[in-house]
């Protein structure tokens, strides 16, 4: 019986080790791998942030996703409009968020694939969004919000409008606060020449070459969460 229990516990722990690895693989198959390295963080913009340049800081490394010290909060109306620029063409497959508390959690997210970079607060209602997502409260970054990936296939500029639908302008506590935005998907390739906001020719930018080599490396190993 000693041999039996020993064999059993050994087999069990080995099995769960394998399971974790498989779990990450399944995650990657379903939701994509991190696009963090392709976000042009210094140029990302956030409209209606209460503190200048706080919006771009919530595009953090995955390991910092639960850090609530760094966050962005809306100034008025419980709305934040992000412009996310990518250094390559990517496919967006899922989004992860860390919210702060129920009072400041956004309830709706609208997404636009906006290569011409034209959508802002003044005109967003004139442009049908690529996708609208009803959000649930998540302060542990557990949920993956899946995108309609065919609408975000050759993505270079993403607009994200977060809203709190039960916003009450008389209540100071209802401004939206977000601590982390994680984007997942696939690297598609260097930016093509049709990308309107690209100033340089893709071919003449040595970094593109490095990025694609780096991305292939990333895709071949399953390190990227």
Image (cartoon, grey):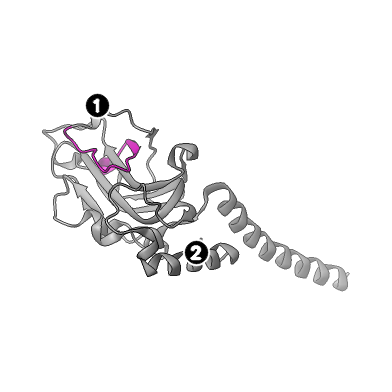
Does residue 121 appear left or right of residue 141 in this picture?
left
Residue bearing mark 1: 126
Q: Which residues are magenta?
A: 103-122
Q: Is residue 159 above or below residue 53?
A: above
Task: In this rendered view, identify the residue nearer to me: 153 or 22.
Answer: 153
Q: Label 2 crowding class (10 Å Cα cut-off): few <14, some 14-19, many 20+?
A: some
Q: Residue placed at 34% from the left, 48% from the top?
A: 195
**Whole-number angstrom distance, CA of label 2 to CA of label 1:** 36 Å
Looking at the image, is mark 2 or mark 1 earlier in the sequence? 1
Regarding residue 71, the answer to whether it shows in the image is no
**2 and 1 marks in contact (CB < 8 Å):** no
Q: Position of residue 218 (x, y in %)?
A: 53, 65
Q: Residue at x 25, y 61 (%)?
A: 42
Q: Does 60 sit above or below residue 175?
A: below
User: Residue drawn 65% across and 58% down?
Assistant: 22
Count the labels in the image.
Answer: 2
Whether residue 21 sits left or right of residue 87 in the image: it is right
Q: Is residue 105 magenta?
A: yes
> Label 2: which residue?
215
Looking at the image, residue 125 lies above or below residue 36 = above
Residue 75 in the magenta stretch? The answer is no
Q: Position of residue 9 (x, y in %)?
A: 76, 67
Query: Image quarter for residue 13?
Result: bottom right
Q: 154 or 29: nearer the eye?
A: 154
Quadrant of the image containing the N terminus:
bottom right
Q: Residue at x 16, y 44 (%)?
A: 48
**Residue 152, horizontal then vertical, whole percent:** 43, 41
Q: Nearer the viewer, residue 5 or 117?
A: 117
Question: Which numbered tag is attached to residue 79?
Answer: none
SS assignment at label 2: helix
Q: Secondary structure at mark 1?
A: helix
Residue 99 in view, yes or no: yes
């Amino acid at each position: 019986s000693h041999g039996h229990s020993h064999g059993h516990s050994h087999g069990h722990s080995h099995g769960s080790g394998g399971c974790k690895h498989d779990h990450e693989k399944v995650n990657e198959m379903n939701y994509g791998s991190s696009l963090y390295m392709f976000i042009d963080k210094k140029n990302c913009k956030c409209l209606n942030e209460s503190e200048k340049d706080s919006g771009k800081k919530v595009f953090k490394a995955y390991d910092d996703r639960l850090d609530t010290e760094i966050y962005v909060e809306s100034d008025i109306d419980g709305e934040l409009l992000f412009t996310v620029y990518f250094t390559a063409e990517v496919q967006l497959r899922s989004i992860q968020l860390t919210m702060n508390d129920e009072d400041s959690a956004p309830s709706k997210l609208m997404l636009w694939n906006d290569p011409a970079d034209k959508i802002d607060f003044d005109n967003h209602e004139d442009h049908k969004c690529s996708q609208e997502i009803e959000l649930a409260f998540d302060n542990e970054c557990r949920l993956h919000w899946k995108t309609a990936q065919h609408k975000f296939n050759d993505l270079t500029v993403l607009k994200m409008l977060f809203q709190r639908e039960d916003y009450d302008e008389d209540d100071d506590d209802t401004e939206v606060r977000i601590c982390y935005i994680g984007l997942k998907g696939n690297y598609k390739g260097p930016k093509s020449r049709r990308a309107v906001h690209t100033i340089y020719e893709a071919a003449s930018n040595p970094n593109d070459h490095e990025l694609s080599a780096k991305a292939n490396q990333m895709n071949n190993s399953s390190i990227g969460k």
